[in-house]
Image (cartoon, rainbow, N blue to C red):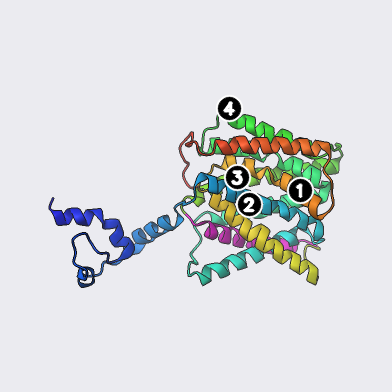
Amino acid sequence: MDRSSIRGTSVGSEVIAEGNPARVGDAPDAAANRPRVTPPCGSAGRARRVAESAAPTMSHARSLSVLHVAVLLFGLAGLFGVWLTLSPIAIVLGRTTIAALALAAVAMVLGDLRRPAAGLAINGAVLAFHWLAFFVAIRVAGVAVGLLGFASFPLWTLVLERSLDERRAVRGDWIVAGLVVAGLVLTVPPFDRREVVLHGLAWGVASGATFAWLAVRNRRFAREVPARAVALWQNTFAALVLVPVAALWPGALRWPTAEEAGLLLALGLGSTALAHTLFVAALARVTAHVASVVAALEPVYGIALASAFLGERPTPGMLAGCALLVAAAVVASRAAGAPPAGPAGRMPA
């Protein structure tokens, strides 16, 4: 192989990225005299550009920090459930619509509005059902029962990751999941076995299961699609799924007051668009199991925020549960830098 071919091989990626770079040994004006090499076009070029733009650039430590910020914003959403008197359908439809519009505006300003990846429509439907089920559980049986049902999601995550060959669970994962469930059981007060409570608990479990499924699917998308695009299209499809439901459900919609419109705007921008984008971005570097354990801190953040903004004081049981949740998050976070225990599954359609 001659020297020119070696030079061409060594800087091939630079030629694609920059178009016309100077090579070692060139005269100062040599680059300007050579023919310009254009980036690859067609499906291969688009795939390469998508892969480069979607490649994870955050370290594990930064991904965990971003994940905690997202969970804090999700915990803030619980306060909006208290402040807003709209129906669960109206709240979820409002937050997803506002989030989708905001993310679309950002994408258009940045010139990065792209078509949705295959499978994101399913994610949008799952996201809509998850939020709807959680708000219904809270409205039917209260926040305590809703959180208790939602506490099942770390176990669902382990089961789904194992069944989809995303990752083989080890004994430590089950111990951490047990700590999460125990912590959430202590965090919420006891409840009775009335039919309405069991009904709300069932909705809470459904919310936890769909959250786990969404986390596993989002981790796979986060490897190939930019987080902002995933958040945009998932919220868009979630809103589209809820439009006919809201139209056909009696009393689901009413015009919000000016105060409610402002609260929906804050909920859609901060606790939905931003939080969802950060959560998906973090999933590019941490497993769905670790994300579910960190997301279990949502009640901890929620209790702290409720104490600060609503004047609600936590009970000793809540504080003990919060301690277990923090311990579980610390254990899972310390193990986050370990290589995956199993092969990554294929992107579901």
- Please say whether residue 68 is visible from this viewpoint: yes
Count numbered badges in the picture.
Answer: 4
**Circle 2 sits in a helix, a strand or a loop, which is it?**
helix
Q: Nearer the viewer, residue 170 or 216?
A: 170
The single residue placed furthest to the left in the displayed view is 2
Residue under numbered circle 1: 304
Mark 1 and mark 3 lie on one chain; the one further toward the N terminus is 3
Residue at position x 76%, y 40% in the image: 148
Find disc 4 in the rendering and name its residue: 171
220 vs 339, nearest the viewer: 339
Q: CA distance from mark 1 to mark 3?
A: 28 Å
Are the two marked residues, 1 and 3, in contact with CB atoms closer than 8 angstroms? no
* Mark nearer the viewer, 4 or 1: 1
Q: Earlier in the sequence, mark 2 or mark 4?
A: 2
Against 310, residue 327 (above or below) is: above
Q: Do labels 4 and 1 touch, CB within 8 Å?
A: no
Residue at far front of view: 28
Q: The disc labelled 2 sits on which kind of residue?
A: Val
Residue that mark 3 sits on: 213
In which image quadrant can residue 261 be found?
bottom right
Q: Is residue 309 toward the left or the right of residue 98 in the image?
A: right
Three-letter amino acid code of the residue under disc 1 = Ala
Residue 16: image location, x then y, percent: 31, 61
Distance Cα–Cα, label 2 vs label 4:
28 Å
The residue identified by callout 2 is 69
**Prevailing secondary structure class for the magenta stretch in the rendered image:** helix
Disc 4 marks a residue whose amino acid type is Arg
For image coordinates 71% across by 43% down, the residue present is: 150
Q: Earlier in the sequence, mark 2 or mark 1?
A: 2
Task: Tell me the mark number nearer the camera, choosing from 1 and 3.
Answer: 1
Q: Residue furthest top?
A: 171
Q: CA distance from mark 2 to mark 3?
A: 21 Å
